[in-house]
Amino acid sequence: MRKKAYNQGMSEFNSLGLGRYVASGPQATPIEYVIVQRPLDPVLAFTRRSIDDVVNSPIVKNEVYGYYKLQKWVERGSEIVDLEQHWNPLGRRG
C-alpha cells in the first residue's frame, strides 16, 4: 500500500497560483524614535530662573514668556535666511 504524496508547498496556493506570504522567523517590530524637546531650558538658564519661579510668580512668568517669544522669533529669522541662501545662493537680501 502506497501513501499519497502530499506537497505542503502546494497547499499554500489558491486557484490563481498565488499564495499567502507567511513570514518565517521572529517578526520585526517597528522602530520608534523619540526626540525629547525642552524649549524652556535655554530660556530658564538665560534668565537664571527655575520652573518653580515661573509657576509661583506672574511677573517671572511674563519675563520668561517674553524671552521665549524672542528666542522663537530669532530662530525663525535664522531659518528663513538659511533657506533663502540654500534656494538662491547668488541673491542676498539686505
Image: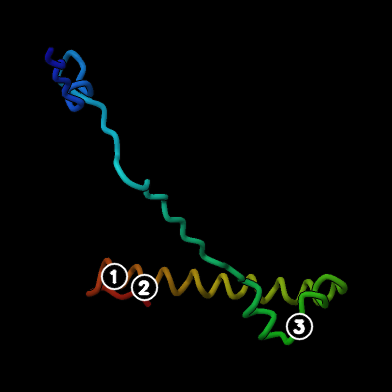
Q: Please provide percent x and percent y for residue 82.
A: 36, 73
Relative to 85, residue 29 above or below: above
- Which class describes the residues within 10 Å of circle 3: few (<14), some (14-19), or many (20+)? some
**Quadrant housing residue 47:** bottom right
Q: Nearer the viewer, mark 3 or mark 1?
A: 3
Determine whether the residue tagged by mark 2 lies in a helix, strand or loop.
helix
Q: Quadrant of residue 21?
A: top left
Q: Residue at x 26, y 69 (%)?
A: 88
The reply to whether the C-beta atoms of the residues labelled 3 and 2 are less than 8 Å apart is no
Residue 24 appears at what percent x and percent y? Answer: 29, 42
Q: Which residue is mark 3?
A: 49
The residue that mark 1 highlights is 86
Which numbered disc, 3 or 1, marks the residue that appears first in the sequence? 3
- The amino acid type of the residue labelled 2 equals Asp
Place of residue 25 in the rendered image (x, y in percent of width and height, measured from the top left): 32, 46
Q: Which residue is mark 2?
A: 82
How many tags in the picture? 3
Q: Residue at x 38, y 77 (%)?
A: 94
Q: In this view of the protein, which residue sits in the foreground, 9 or 18?
A: 9
Compared to residue 73, the image places residue 28 above or below, namely above
Are the residues tagged 1 and 2 within 8 Å (C-beta)?
yes
